[in-house]
Amino acid sequence: MITTEGSRNPSRRRLLERVVVGAGGLISALVAIPPLAMFLGPMFRRVPEPWRTVGRVNDFRIGETVQVTFENASPIPWSGQTGLTAAWLRRESEGRFIAFSVNCAHLGCPVRWEGRAQLFFCPCHGGTYYADGSVAAGPPPRGLSQYAVRVQGDQVQILASPLPL
Ligand code: FES
């Protein structure tokens, strides 16, 4: 009569089967977890508030345009200074602010504000904009892009969304 190890010791065979099934399940889980985390992670990750406080209302004078910096919409922890972006903020009246992109609507060069002339100038091709961001001269096809701005209590906030160049 021929006997095998398993038939001689059925409990040992069952134990080996369970070890093999358990190891297979563990390996499957290790393979499946990274893709699941990638797809489901954003559902559980805290989305940063895209409104950025740039100062208190009374930090800005009516009729004045100043440059403000704020954290961009999707900073990563190690981005440091590169996670910051800027806008030209103009206080129009008691409670009304306008935030302009710092990038020219022509090819994206940074524009600078000249308070005495009340104009934005682009150094690249001579684009010029009025204080309200509309085109005064040069090649820009449209006015400066604007960020949404709101006043919350005494805080001025800019919606840090990406703008078209
Ligand atoms: S990039 Fe500003 S005028 Fe060309």
Image (spheres, rainbow, N blue to C red):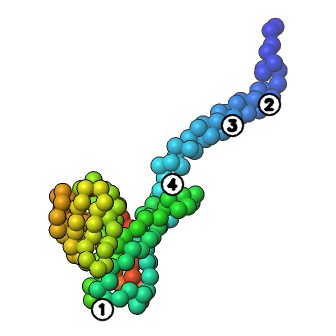
Within-10-Å neighbours for mark 2: few <14, some 14–19, many 20+: few
Within-10-Å neighbours for mark 4: few <14, some 14–19, many 20+: few
Left or right position of 77 against 126:
right
User: Which residue type carries mark 4?
Assistant: Gly
Q: Nearer the viewer, residue 117 or 87?
A: 117
Number of the label disc, if any, that sits on residue 22: 3
Sooner in the amino-acid sequence: mark 4 or mark 2? 2
Dot 2 corresponds to which residue? 11
- At 44% from the left and 78% from the top, the residue drawn is 53
User: Which residue type carries mark 3?
Assistant: Gly
- Disc 2 or disc 3, which is closer to the eye? 3
Left or right position of 102 against 118:
right
Q: Nearer the viewer, residue 118 or 46?
A: 118
Sooner in the amino-acid sequence: mark 1 or mark 2? 2
Sooner in the amino-acid sequence: mark 3 or mark 1? 3
Per the model, the C-alpha gap separating discs 3 and 1 is 69 Å
Per the model, the C-alpha gap separating discs 2 and 3 is 16 Å
Horizontal and vertical percent position of residue 72: 44, 64
Looking at the image, residue 8 lies above or below residue 124: above
Q: In the image, is the residue at mark 2 within 8 Å of ligand 1 by its beta carbon?
A: no
Kind of element beneath mark 1 = loop
The quadrant the C terminus occupies is bottom left
Sooner in the amino-acid sequence: mark 1 or mark 4? 4
Within-10-Å neighbours for mark 3: few <14, some 14–19, many 20+: few
Q: Is residue 146 visible?
A: no
Dot 4 corresponds to which residue? 41
- At 58% from the left and 57% from the top, the residue drawn is 78
User: Which residue type carries mark 1?
Assistant: Glu
- At 25% from the left and 77% from the top, the residue drawn is 117
Dot 1 corresponds to which residue? 94
